[in-house]
């Protein structure tokens, strides 16, 4: 009966605008397989929900992520 | 002092693109009424937040939901 | 394919230490019935997860909830 | 190792369509500084994720937020 | 910069009271490896948070999970 | 109408078992003040919910946080 929520920044992927549907399908399959393998959960009652988050909306190190990366590489 | 988060797939509704504003208002009212009835919570401090999730972003049975339904009905 | 998360303060209920199992079952049933009625969702793929939150861990009005209520009634 | 999620209604800001990137950066910085000050957390492992929620999708008092405000001011 | 939240029922594991620390470590490693493989994410900025949920607090099919399983097998 | 969720590891604080009630009250006040200052939100409709997460249940770098810190310092 697991519920998994994966939050990622909206970037990368084939067009630079976020993961492709195929990549998301890989995340869904991989996460579900992991829960089956480690905890013997049933896939039919395993939900995986992916949230893509705009870069402006994700902060780390006290900065929006784009500024944080610039500061690291500065 | 409840906080309720309802996540649903973005589909159905009057135009097939997700629930209407009226349907969302029904969810908000119904959930709030339930918390008042069962736990005597105050509506004024009951928040309900609805998230619509794209079909690509919701997995069940190890598959994106559209593929899962096809597999079930295959 | 809905997922509902209900967060409530850990208080009230038959012993003052939070809702009883019966009250939680009512919340689960009521929320699921609402999603069936309003959006025609399938109960078998409707998850409801309840989180009880300690009073120290819930703030409103800039105060922990117990202090907030005292201030309101003060 | 904190993770902070801030959910706000999508409104206000310089064009009335939600907070500006600068306002979001202030939220990220302010929240991170607070966790450093109060709990001595490391900024490099402090994530802040902001979700803007459409007004239709936020309920309080059993009503969508716009209707709730009208009712209060009615 | 991913954040993953895994919610599972508190059951199973070596003593029937939930997954062991080793099983949780496997979930953390497996999820992180998946995000590295599929999306080339950096492990150092990948958080995984596991929530164990009491059986009373998880509903499916309109019932608490224990009652739901009984009904299915009835 | 903001809702803020702060997840932190259960450690530190006056007895090493997590933040004190006073520290949590500071987080609640600081977060609320920030939302008032930056976005002019009303404190009375600002919720802050704090979750303390056991060290076993938090992963970073593909490891439970305690192992991750050992590996960094190793």
Image: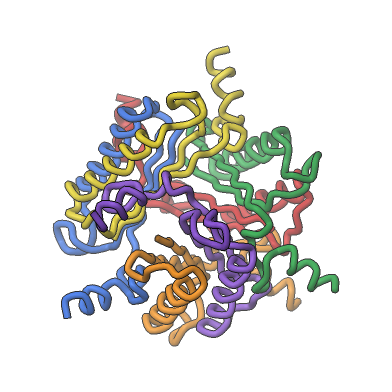
Chain colours: A yellow, B purple, C orange, D green, E blue, F red
Farthest residue in the right direction? D74
Q: Residue at x 41, y 32 (%)?
A: A20
Numbered-mark total: 0
Residue toward you, A52 or E42: A52
Q: As rendered, which of D61 and F45 lies closer to the eye?
A: D61
The residue at 43%/36% (across/down) is E2
Eyeballing the image, is C36 above or below A8? below
Q: Which residue is depicted at the point 48% across and 48% down?
A: B54
Residue at the outermost top position: A74
> Which quadrant: the C terminus of chain F?
top left
Q: Nearer the viewer, residue E70 or F19?
A: E70
Q: Quadrant of residue C48?
A: bottom left
In the displayed structure, does residue A21 sit left or right of residue B21?
left
Residue A57: % across, % down = 60, 38
Residue occupying the far left of the picture: E14
Taking A59 as reference, is D59 above or below it? below
Q: Is residue F66 visible to the viewer in this orientation of the structure? A: no
As drawn, is E33 to the left or to the right of A71?
left
The outermost residue toward the bottom is C14
Quarter in which the N terminus of chain F is drawn: bottom right
In the image, what residue occupies the spot 33% across and 30% down?
A: E38
Q: Position of residue F53 (x, y in %)?
A: 41, 52
Q: Give the left or right position of residue C12, taking residue C64 as reference.
A: left
Whether residue B3 can be seen here: yes
Residue F56 x %, y %: 31, 47
Residue D68 at x, y percent in the picture: 74, 69
């Amino acid at each position: 009966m697991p519920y998994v929520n994966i939050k990622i920044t909206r970037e990368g992927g084939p067009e630079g605008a976020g993961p492709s549907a195929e990549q998301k399908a890989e995340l869904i399959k991989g996460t579900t397989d992991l829960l089956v393998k480690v905890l013997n959960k049933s896939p039919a009652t395993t939900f995986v929900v992916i949230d893509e988050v705009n870069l402006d909306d994700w902060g780390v190190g006290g900065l929006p992520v784009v500024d944080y990366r610039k500061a690291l590489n500065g």
